[in-house]
Amino acid sequence: MSNTNSRGFTSNLGAILAAAGGAVGLGNIWRFPYMLGQNGGGAFLLVYILFVLMIGIPLMMTEFIIGRRSQRNVVGAYKTLGGKQKGWVLLGIFGIVAAFLIYAFYSVVAGWTLNYLVMSCRGQLAGLPPEEVANVFSTFTQGSFWPLFFQLIFLVMTGLVITMGVQKGIEKVGKILMPVLFLLLILMCVRSLTLSGSHQGMSFLFKPDFSKLTGQSILSALGQSFFSLSIGMGAMVTYGSYIRKEDRLFKTSIWIALCDLLVAVLAGIVIFPAVFAFGMDPASGPELVYVVLPNVFNNMPAGTLFAVIFFLLLAIAALTSTISLLEIIVAFGVEELHWKRSTASLVGTILVFVVGVFCTLSFGPLKDVKIFDRTIFEFFDLITASYLMPIGALLMTIFLGWCYPKVEVKDELSNNGTLKVRAFELYYIILRYIAPLALIAIIISGIVG
Ligand code: PHE
């Protein structure tokens, strides 16, 4: 049975590109490089790859199984599959709340990409000395009007795509933008690798020095893999409900996770050789992309052009991810509250903006408002990536591994028994034991600090 005329994606490639678009985002190009820079380089990369393969892929499959089995949004999915165990609906609501919080702070950084894109197109960063580049960043982010303006533009663009629907909006945008993203990324890699002195950055990225690995950096790698693969809050449950019944969930998840991993590694290849070639600090944190890279561009031939390409790339990556965030909320509004898609997009966007304003202003006028010693933005980032997503993922593994019949899981993964899934037992062990234990470890160590 094909979904061509129904609610879901029209092809397997469309599903892979749309979901890879949701996974590939600021998490890969902004967050991953600075986390790697702060956590010692190559060893972090290795641990990260291990987590993606061992835990990330099985958990993505788990979300797809829940979504496709139920054919519903994240709340509807737990309502349907939970049956008499009504409490599981709360896990769906938890996903919607997490999507709101992530979208609220994520759209701030997404807005920055637009500002930097406009500035690089106008050559406003070209030739500035390093202190000035840093100044531009702090003046911009501490302001009110422009950061809010760009955040709103981003929210509106996302809302428009979502209003166009799953096939004409999400799938189409994924099919067009993901190949463009890869192309731009490869172009940037070539540029970075042909800089003299690039080898130092390559060894930083690929030569593991295990003495730099700490317990905390291992846990950061696990958290980063969740954030990057969008696992633990229902994004992949929602997209899973759009995957055709004849597509292979095993293969689909592997492709998406590998795409996500590849983009993160390529982003590393773009950033570190350049950072080292110009003697910059790889451990400068969240500002790496916005403060360090413009200096790098200023030092390279045709730097303005590459700055434009880079920030365009970042904006595209962010857009396909904000689309997946809003879709979680809109699918819920349409299917559970019976709203029109356009109404749900509008209401979702307005609500996120109301909360997002506080995240944006927490860099400027509200920077002294602290929650547990963190600004509003930092607090949202922390509770979602470090707590809500791992807790959501943990509860999800308990649901599918312990409270839902094994035969049904196997049935969904094997397309009603028509496929041979040789790795099923391995998957099931990871689902029941390995993933929950690893998750409990991160959550506890996060709480203990
Ligand atoms: N995975 C996205 C990224 O790497 C972030 C994201 C998280 C998107 C959760 C949707 C849901 O940027």
Image: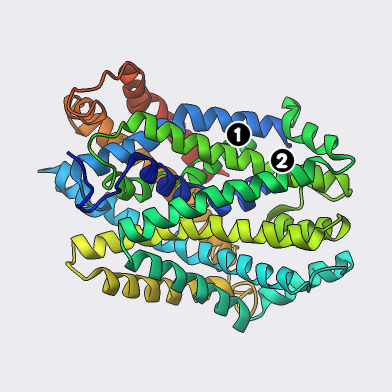
- Which of marks 2 and 1 precedes in the sequence? 1
- How is the rendered protein coloured? rainbow
**Is label 1 or label 2 in front?**
2
Q: Residue at x 33, y 68 (%)?
A: 163
Q: Position of residue 227 (x, y in %)?
A: 50, 47
Q: Which residue is mark 2?
A: 269
Q: Residue 410 falls in which quadrant of the image?
A: top left
Within 10 Å of disc 2 (Cα), the crowding (few <14, some 14-19, many 20+) is many
Q: Residue at x 17, y 27 (%)?
A: 416
Q: Is residue 199 above or below residue 446?
A: above
Q: Position of residue 119 (x, y in %)?
A: 71, 72
- Residue 158: tell me if it is visible: yes
- Residue 445: tell me if it is visible: no
Q: Please state which of residues 387 and 23 is positioned toward the viewer in this rendering.
A: 23
Q: Position of residue 303 (x, y in %)?
A: 81, 59
Secondary structure at numbered mark 2: helix
Residue type pointed to by label 1: Ile
Q: Quadrant of the C terminus?
A: top right
Q: Which residue is mark 1?
A: 218
> Residue farthest to the bottom?
145
Q: For this view, does 113 lie left or right of residue 434?
A: right
Residue type pointed to by label 2: Ile
Within 10 Å of disc 1 (Cα), the crowding (few <14, some 14-19, many 20+) is some
